[in-house]
Image (cartoon, rainbow, N blue to C red):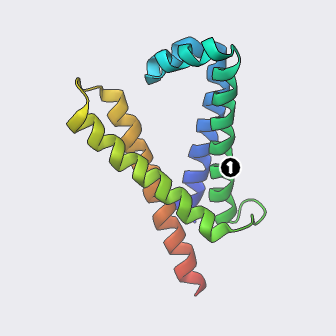
Amino acid sequence: MKLLRLGGYINILIAIAHVVGLFWAQEMYDYTGVGENMQRNAEIHPLLPTAMTVFVAIFFLIFGLYGLSAAGIVKKLPFLKLGVFTIAAIYLVRGIVGSVINIGFESSFIWYHLLFSLCALGIGVLYLLGGLQIWKSKV
């Protein structure tokens, strides 16, 4: 349960960071490597980058709530088992694919891209192991 609780709180912190980061949106976008894409999106509609960031923050919040729900901290959410393992899969794929792309295919190595991928991998492991731990004990 500790693993899912930690994963849940990390996701909630990431969601909060996305929302707080909107106060310094361009700097945040540039630092994370999405600055150019967000500038193109702003040309489509000025609020599109903000809306996309809020949308992503909502997903992190939902992921966090699923971790906390599986850990017994918040009310049981629907499709809890499926949710936890789906979140684990999303993070694991993001971590592995992102690391491979960063190390093997980017024209220049960007350390924080690798760091983000490794963080995703770590969160995926928290959800996977935490989910396995909880559901093995309930069987």
Any part of residue 136 in sight: yes
Q: Nearer the viewer, residue 85 or 1?
A: 85
| Image coordinates for residue 64, horizontal then vertical, percent | 64, 50
- Where does the image place residue 10, in percent across and percent down from the top left? 56, 44
Q: Position of residue 120 (x, y in %)?
A: 44, 45
Residue at the (69%, 40%) spot, across then down: 58
Residue 91 point in image, percent of width and height: 47, 51
The amino acid sitting under disc 1 is Ile
Instruction: Say which quarter of the image contains residue 117.
Output: top left
Residue at far bottom of view:
139
Q: Secondary structure at mark 1?
A: helix
Which quarter of the image is occupied by the C terminus? bottom right
**Count of numbered tags:** 1
- The answer to whether any part of residue 71 appears in the image is no
Looking at the image, residue 2 sits to the left or right of residue 129; the answer is: right
Q: Residue at (55%, 52%) from the top-left corner?
A: 7
Front one among 32 and 52: 52
Classed neighbour count for the residue bearing mark 1: other residues with Cα under 10 Å, few (<14), some (14–19), many (≥20): some
Query: Which image quadrant is residue 119 in?
Result: top left
Q: Which residue is mark 1?
A: 62
> Which residue reaches farthest front?
44
Is 89 rendered above or below residue 12? below
Vertical arrangement, residue 67 with respect to residue 130, above or below: above
Give the residue displayed 62% in from the left and 29% down from the top.
Answer: 18
Q: Is residue 54 above or below residue 134?
A: above
Q: Is residue 101 left or right of residue 49?
A: left
Residue at image location 52% in from the left, 19% down from the top: 29
